[in-house]
Image (cartoon, rainbow, N blue to C red):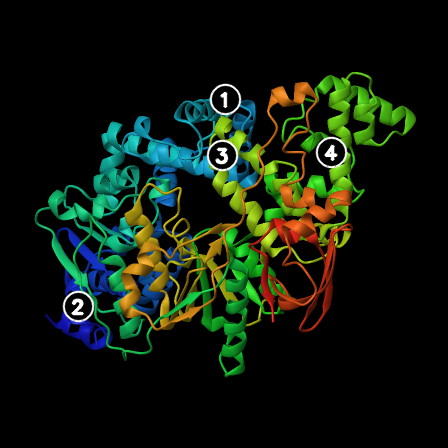
């Protein structure tokens, strides 16, 4: 066939035999299993060109569905390079754009859509009505739960992760009711309504089938049941249905997507042809070997063996930094080394499981003046509600707090201060200028023991005012009982107290050794809710991205951060295979150099290497290790209600043992309990490194240490209370 010969002469020189086979398939269903870096976009664009030039298919008869609008635009542009203006008559778009078009044409008017901001507002209202936390992270998680439930094959069987099923059902019902009142559809409704229309109105379905006789779908592993129904309905009865995807890169289960449609495609279409693209043109041999070892133990996948024409390259590296802060510092050092040796910052991709991990990374890159761009943004953790609570305590301690801060935290943990008492205190403050906390005790509405507890809180805040930022945060969490409040809160409202405490631990770990006014000024200097990076439009910059955001990208050098159990795989995930696929996606972004980083501590807790990293140990170079920090002591427990009624001192309000022993007349007790604390002993500090004690003042609770480049006076209470940040080695 002359047309075919001419096509291969013009376009086929760079195609592999498997790619040619997929491109040349015309009639009937086609399943293309495309591994990472195997040229799937090339196959789709060349297949469109083949159908137009060789099979003489009308451009308007082709429907190409992609995962994102950007991918659709890229694919249309690449097709236009091959076939010219005929690409403009072919439909390229997302499944949501397709559904919108079908509904608009069938009903004669555009569907009234609820924009994203309005949808968030409705969900927030529903959550507030039930007394749930509504900070941005919790709100987005709830929206994801709603989308996953509506997109699943059995919405009633959806099991939410954020809240109890009964609570989720109430949020969903309230959201749907308000949306119905407004007469709007959200993006999930758009798909549901499109499917309903195709099933109930035969003439609409017939119109779609006459128009689009060939259906091609990219990233098919990420379709959900509703999307699959729409596509298969349109593709029938001719079943000229081409799907391209990789079951090993299915990573959107949290929003209802499932690789089952891809895995079961041959069963659903018995006469389909299957082509596997198993040549990876991106990664070196050793990187590909490590990635293959990571994904191989996964269940529910097509067995495949990827090869590469590239050189073996160097073995992937394994880092074992002490914690996430040292991890970020190593990342910065690696970037600086790469640039100093003639490379570009744009060569480097830093990939992690959760957006929260970007906080420490971005702070360190900022401090080192390394340009970066964050795909999806770096969330401003200072705006998260638990951090806001801790900051409210710090503002009160620093003399910056007013009524808003006091009301925010006075009962976190519960100090049994009623709204009536707060209202009376506010009036007292307004009329006589009594400071907020003192005004609460001066209302005359509280018993003596209750006033005593407020005096103790004021005493604690005075102590906090003299601490450096990391010590102050630790004091609020442990001594004032805020961590225990979080445990009680999550037991009542759902969600994970462990994750919330981990958030505070990361903020505490990354906080600079600065006094409270300086630290709070830095917090206020954060410009927005989400930071997109510090790089200018034309700057060469490091890329920061979650595993999800990194999909489809590639870099000469990739560092996968936080590769520990609890983060990757994430503790909240119910699907260990999807977590394994996320790790695989992250590893296969690397072209020449791959680093897996497994800190000994993350989010304030000891951590062990990810089981996925354990699977690839034989394929890694020797470890770049750090000594693991010791396990921190447990925090004190909060006071029970009965203790409060007896007028006893709250454990949440009582200093931890080390703090208590290191102040005032009890200083001698601390000296006796810690005889190793004396001039000349060696110590380690998490920020300043190794040093030697110059002097210890037990009465004033201060310890002075000479480090290599500075002499620093530290709060002795903090040193004794946080062994993960300060350790005594002994004398020479």
Q: State the residue position of label 1.
A: 181
Measured along the vertical axis of the image, is residue 523 above or below residue 534?
Answer: above
| Place of residue 315 in the rendered image (x, y in percent of width and height, measured from the top left) | 33, 74
Label 4 vs label 3: CA separation?
A: 47 Å
Label 1 vs label 3: CA separation?
A: 12 Å
Q: Could you tell me which residue is drawn at 25 percent across and 65 percent down?
A: 46
Tag 3: Cα neighbours inside 10 Å, few (<14), some, or many (≥20)?
some
Measured along the vertical axis of the image, is residue 660 above or below residue 26?
Answer: above
Drawn side of residue 576 relative to residue 504, left or right: left
Q: Earlier in the sequence, mark 4 or mark 3?
A: 3
Q: Are marks 2 and 4 in contact (CB under 8 Å)?
A: no
Residue 652 in view in this figure: yes
Task: Give the image quarter of residue 316.
Answer: bottom left
| Place of residue 96 in the rendered image (x, y in percent of width and height, measured from the top left) | 38, 43
Q: Which mark is residue 417?
A: none
Q: Which mark is residue 114?
A: 3
Tag 1: Cα neighbours inside 10 Å, few (<14), some, or many (≥20)?
few
Label 2 vs label 3: CA separation?
A: 44 Å
Q: Are marks 1 and 2 in contact (CB under 8 Å)?
A: no
Drawn side of residue 661 relative to residue 552, left or right: right
Label 2 vs label 4: CA separation?
A: 74 Å
Label 4 vs label 1: CA separation?
A: 47 Å
Q: State the residue position of label 2.
A: 20
Drawn side of residue 586 relative to residue 689, left or right: left
Q: Nearer the viewer, residue 307 or 294?
A: 294
SS state under label 1: helix
Residue 36 in view in this figure: no
Q: Earlier in the sequence, mark 1 or mark 2?
A: 2
Q: Earlier in the sequence, mark 4 or mark 1?
A: 1
């Amino acid at each position: 066939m002359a047309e075919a010969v001419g096509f291969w002469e013009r376009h086929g020189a760079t195609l592999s035999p498997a790619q040619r086979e997929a491109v040349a398939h015309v009639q009937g269903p086609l399943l293309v299993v495309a591994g990472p870096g195997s040229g799937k976009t090339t196959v789709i664009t060349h297949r469109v060109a083949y159908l137009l030039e060789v099979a003489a298919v009308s451009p308007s008869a082709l429907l190409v569905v992609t995962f994102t609008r950007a991918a659709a635009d890229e694919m249309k542009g690449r097709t236009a390079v091959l076939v010219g203006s005929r690409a403009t008559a072919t439909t390229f778009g997302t499944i949501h754009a397709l559904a919108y078009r079908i509904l608009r044409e069938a009903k004669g008017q555009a569907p009234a859509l609820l924009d994203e901001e309005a949808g968030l507002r409705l969900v927030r209202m529903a959550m507030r009505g039930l007394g749930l936390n509504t900070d941005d992270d919790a709100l987005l998680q709830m929206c994801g739960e709603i989308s996953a439930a509506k997109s699943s094959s059995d919405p009633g069987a959806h099991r939410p992760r954020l809240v109890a099923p009964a609570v989720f059902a109430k949020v969903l019902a309230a959201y749907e009711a308000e949306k119905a009142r407004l007469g709007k559809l959200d993006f999930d409704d758009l798909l549901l309504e499109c499917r309903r229309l195709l099933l109930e109105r035969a003439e609409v379905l017939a119109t779609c089938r006459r128009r689009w006789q060939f259906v091609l779908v990219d990233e098919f592993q990420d379709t959900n049941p509703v999307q699959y129904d729409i596509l298969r309905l349109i593709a029938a009865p001719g079943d000229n249905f081409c799907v391209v995807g990789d079951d090993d890169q299915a990573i959107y289960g949290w929003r209802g997507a499932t690789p089952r449609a891809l895995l079961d495609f041959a069963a659903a279409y018995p006469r389909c042809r299957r082509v596997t693209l198993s040549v990876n043109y991106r990664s070196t041999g050793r990187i590909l070997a490590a990635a293959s070892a990571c994904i191989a133990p996964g269940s529910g996948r097509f067995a495949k063996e990827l090869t590469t024409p590239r050189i073996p390259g160097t073995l992937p590296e394994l880092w074992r930094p002490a914690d996430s802060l040292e991890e970020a510092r190593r990342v910065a050092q690696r970037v600086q080394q790469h640039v100093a040796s003639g490379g570009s910052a744009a060569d480097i991709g830093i990939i992690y499981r959760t957006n929260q991990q970007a906080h420490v990374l971005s702070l360190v890159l900022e401090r080192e003046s390394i340009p970066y761009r964050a795909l999806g943004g770096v969330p401003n953790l200072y705006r998260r509600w638990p951090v806001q609570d801790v900051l409210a305590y710090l503002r009160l301690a620093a003399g910056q707090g007013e009524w808003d801060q006091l009301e925010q935290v006075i009962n976190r943990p519960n100090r049994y201060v009623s709204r009536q008492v707060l209202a009376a205190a506010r009036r007292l403050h307004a009329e006589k200028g009594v400071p907020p906390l003192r005004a609460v005790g001066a209302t005359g509405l509280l018993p003596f023991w209750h006033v005593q507890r407020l005096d103790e809180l004021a005493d604690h805040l005075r102590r906090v005012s003299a601490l450096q930022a990391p010590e102050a945060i630790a004091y609020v969490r442990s001594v004032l009982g805020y961590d225990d409040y979080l445990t009680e809160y999550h037991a009542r409202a759902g969600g994970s107290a462990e994750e919330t405490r981990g958030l505070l631990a990361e903020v505490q770990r990354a906080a600079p050794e600065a006094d409270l006014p300086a630290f709070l000024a830095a917090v206020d200097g954060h410009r927005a809710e989400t930071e997109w990076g510090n790089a200018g439009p034309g700057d060469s910059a490091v890329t920061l991205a979650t595993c999800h955001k990194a999909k489809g990208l590639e870099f000469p050098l990739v560092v996968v951060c936080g590769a520990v159990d609890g983060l990757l795989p994430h503790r909240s995930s119910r699907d260990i295979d999807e977590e394994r696929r996320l790790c695989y996606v992250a590893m296969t972004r690397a072209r020449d150099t791959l680093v897996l980083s497994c800190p000994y501590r993350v989010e304030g807790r000891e951590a062990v290497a990810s089981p996925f990293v354990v699977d690839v140990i034989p394929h890694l170079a020797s470890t770049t290790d750090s000594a693991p920090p010791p396990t921190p002591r447990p925090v004190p427990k909060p006071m029970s209600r009965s203790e409060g009624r007896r007028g006893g001192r709250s454990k949440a309000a009582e200093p931890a043992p080390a703090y208590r022993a290191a102040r005032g007349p009890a200083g001698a007790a601390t000296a006796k309990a810690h005889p190793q604390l004396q001039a000349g002993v060696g110590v380690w500090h998490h920020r300043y490194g190794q040093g030697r004690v110059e002097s210890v003042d037990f009465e004033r609770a201060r310890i002075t240490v000479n480090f290599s480049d500075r002499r620093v006076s530290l709060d002795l209470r903090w040193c004794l209370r946080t062994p993960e940040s300060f350790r005594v080695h002994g004398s020479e």
